[in-house]
Image (cartoon, rainbow, N blue to C red):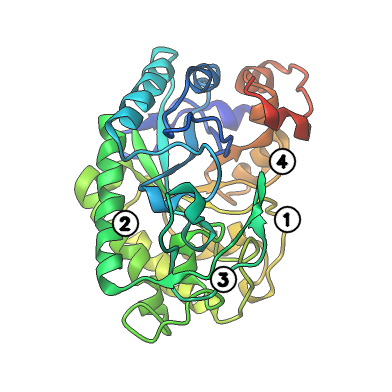
Amino acid sequence: MLANLFTPYKLNDTLTLSNKILMAPLTRCMADDDLVPTQKMVDYYARRADAGLIISEATIIRPDGQGYPNTPGLFTPAQINGWHVVTDAVHKNGGKMFAQLWHTGRVAHPHFFGGGEVLSASAQAVEGTVPRMRELVYQTPKPATLDDIKQLVVDYAQAAANAIEAGFDGVEIHGANGYLIDQFLHHDSNRRDDEYGQTPEKMSRFALEVVDAITTRIGADRTGLRLSPGAYFNMAADPRDRAVFDYLLPELSKRNLAYLHVGIFDDSTQFDYLGGSASAYMRSVYTGTLVGVGSYTAETGSAAIEANKFDLLAIGRPFIANPDYVAKVRDGGELVTYTDNMLAELI
């Protein structure tokens, strides 16, 4: 039944994956105080190189994108060099690795970058406090100006180039889960009345500009994108959001990306305005390679691939508990059950 997980998958003429099991991006907050990857991170990723593709933990493109403590960056020479040690170790063990590029937008906090304004699509604050640092209350963001947006596009493209310099095989743009790009794609967070707001075409503009700048810089064959058409995390749902993704997904289909990744924690979640799950909706509109994720097991993920619900399976928390996840699934070994206390250390 699981044999379909262990056949190679050709993403494009540049990249072929050894199997269809991807390691999902998992925020671990284990970089040093300069946001440089540590030796623990080198060991952590190297042990998981059996995955067909490792997607790194979300990695910020510039200082004001930081919303959690000790999340790594890709904007200084030290950070690039630190990541190169990681990718060298993964490649030495036969793996492939993409960097997930991240700006948290309105869930950033000035505490991490020495003060200044938090940027988002509009001045719509998210409620609550910073995880792991609950004394830090989220701020009302500044709506990004047109000049701010132009610079953000440049900085995303530069981070992608930095990722290639750091030895990554490609990048995944984090356009999901209530972070900056996603904030432009949903009516809850985008109240703009200029060329980046109100209509599906305008609300999709920033995401497409980032995609186009990155693919121009490093190639579409080395570029993936994660999206959350169903609002559910740091975002209120709005039925009008579907029209945005009805426009965006066909536009992305034209761009021949390496893949599109469903941004969901549990793919059994049903969204009325999408007519079902996020992955089913994306499959119905997007024509390229789709990565499914969201509380799947190897068995349920294999069955979903067999049913053509998506092409590749991303596994998250079980990879934290089982560095040898791929080998255990292949050989019928017993998996260690993930527990929350495993977040406190890298194993």
Query: Which one is in front in this view, the residue at disc 4 or the one at disc 1?
Result: 1
Residue 154 lies, in percent from the top left, at 24, 55
Instruction: Estimate the spatial distance between the alpha carbons at disc 4 and disc 3, rounded to whole Å.
Output: 37 Å
The residue under label 4 is which amino acid type?
Answer: Thr
User: Which of the labelled discs sits on residue 311, or is there none?
Assistant: none
User: Which of the labelled discs sits on residue 300, or is there none?
Assistant: 4
Query: Which one is in front in this view, the residue at disc 1 or the one at disc 2?
Result: 2
Instruction: Estimate the spatial distance between the alpha carbons at disc 4 and disc 1, rounded to whole Å.
Output: 11 Å
Residue 303 lies, in percent from the top left, at 68, 41
Q: In what quadrant of the picture does the N terminus appear? A: top right
The residue under label 1 is which amino acid type?
Answer: Ser
Judged left or right of residue 299, residue 164 is left
Residue 135 lies, in percent from the top left, at 67, 52
Which residue does the numbered mark 3 point to in the structure image? 125
Please give the name of the residue rendered at 59% of the width and 62% of the height, measured from the top-left corner: 138
Instruction: Estimate the spatial distance between the alpha carbons at disc 3 and disc 1, rounded to whole Å.
Output: 28 Å
Q: In what quadrant of the picture does the C terminus appear? A: top right
Query: Which one is in front in this view, the residue at disc 3 or the one at disc 2?
Result: 3
Query: What is the secondary structure assignment of the residue under circle 4?
Result: helix
Residues at circles 3 and 2 in contact by the CB criterion of under 8 Å: no
319 or 272, which lies in front?
A: 319
Q: Earlier in the sequence, mark 1 or mark 2?
A: 2
Residue 1: tell me if it is visible. no
Residues at circles 2 and 4 in contact by the CB criterion of under 8 Å: no
Assess disc 3: are there few (<14), some (14-19) or many (≥20) residues with their C-alpha within 10 Å of its C-alpha.
some
Assess disc 2: are there few (<14), some (14-19) or many (≥20) residues with their C-alpha within 10 Å of its C-alpha.
many
Which residue does the numbered mark 1 point to in the structure image? 268
Query: Which one is in front in this view, the residue at disc 4 or the one at disc 3?
Result: 3
